[in-house]
Image (tube, rainbow, N blue to C red):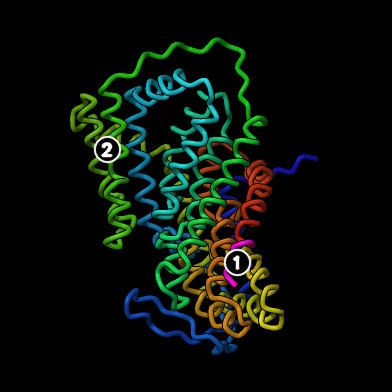
Amino acid sequence: MKLELPHPFILLLAGVAIAAALTWILPSGVYQRRADPTTGRNLVIPGTYARIAPAPVGPLAAIMAVPRGIVAGADVILTVLFVGGAFALLDATGALARLVGSLVGRTNNPRLIVIFVCLAFATLGALENMQEEIIALIPVLLVLSRGLGFGPITALSMSAGAAAVGAAFGPTNPFQTGIALRFSEMPPLSQPTLRFGLLVAAVAVWIAWTITMTGRDRVRTETEPVPIASATARDGVLLALVLLPFVPYVFGVLQYDWGFNELSALFLVAGFAVGLVAGHSLSETATGFLKGMETVLAAALFVGVARAISVVLTDGQVLDTILHALATPLGQLPGLAAAMLMVPAHAVLHVPVPSVSGQAVLTMPVMAPLCDLLQISRDAGVIAYQTGAGLMDLITPTNGALLAMLLAADVPYVTWVRFAVPGVLLVSIVGLVGIALAR
């Protein structure tokens, strides 16, 4: 019997309903918190967990959590819309088809292009935690993958998959490693040799898995390919215009704490630049820009609906209860075993807390002192977080960005999980080795 899950929108709404049900089942409890003067975040104080009066979330409040989640994720939603609009304008010019056709026609080994694309996205993931930005790129990547003779799984693997692996193990990723090290009260680049070595090994394993599975993701066509005109110099200029925003954005993330609002502004400018260079008027460009946004509207909303799950669990005061239930048994185990089991603990917690930065703020102030009690390195605790939470981004059904990309690629969630889980387990071995070496 073939297992089929409902539409991703229904899946996310079911997640909101389950989260609301948990607030009636689990006891409410909170840790005391202190304000971090640099980031303005409230950090958990270890050992202060206490039960509080129940705060169950009713049906009306659960429904209201959906628009609240969309409002909370407005910056990400706008980024998806603006990036999608800019790339739709580029696609409408025919430049993408011509450029991809020229690229594919000049290689006798399509797997080399897959490796190159994997490295590019892994680098972006390691630098700035690239994820939501990929949603709008999926149509482009599908064209490239089909041109190489592969299907949508390869398109997702060499983009979203590689970016997630790079983000999980990127030593300078400010949204995962950086924030986890900070809230573990450790230097910004602790044990750099080990961390860069883990990044290289993890990306290499994922690329190997992707290349191995391309043989099962072949696209068979029974019709003759339609001839595509050669790419022009203007096509190259248009592509450069739509990719250019990523350069100042990465620099801004690393140097000036930029976020999605800055990226949205950059792509707003880039979208109009593409339209004008392509020979459209301002009105025609605006029309094309808005029409392009329509293609990613549903995917963008998924990101906001996913936020509603955390909204419900926070309102019900059960997130700290879940953290306490996962962390307490680890303190009773031998050091290395506890460090290894932190990986599945983080993976489980990443389902109700799909934000990697939010999970770091929630867990690392608890897990770091626990590492001290177990006489293991805090580096081991951070690597456990990276492995469990970071790689879980590839499979958790509460990750709105992942579901949005699957929708854009027309890949069922079950189909993706069958492909991704073995690859995630293989990369997890790299993390487990890192934990052992960090002790």
What residue is drawn where x is 65% and y is 57%?
429
Residue tagged 1: 437
The extreme front residue here reads 193
Element at badge 1?
helix
Residue 311 position, x and y percent, is 49, 68
Which labelled disc corresponds to residue 271?
2
Element at badge 2?
helix
Amino acid at the residue labelled 2: Gly
The magenta region covers: 433-439
Asked if residue 186 lies in the magenta stretch, the reply is no
What residue is drawn where x is 54% and y is 55%?
399
Main SS category, magenta section: helix
Residue 42 falls in image quadrant:
bottom left
User: In this image, 140 relative to 416: left or right?
Assistant: left
Q: Is residue 15 above or below residue 28?
A: above
Dots 1, 2 in contact, CB < 8 A: no
What residue is drawn where x is 55% and y is 42%?
406
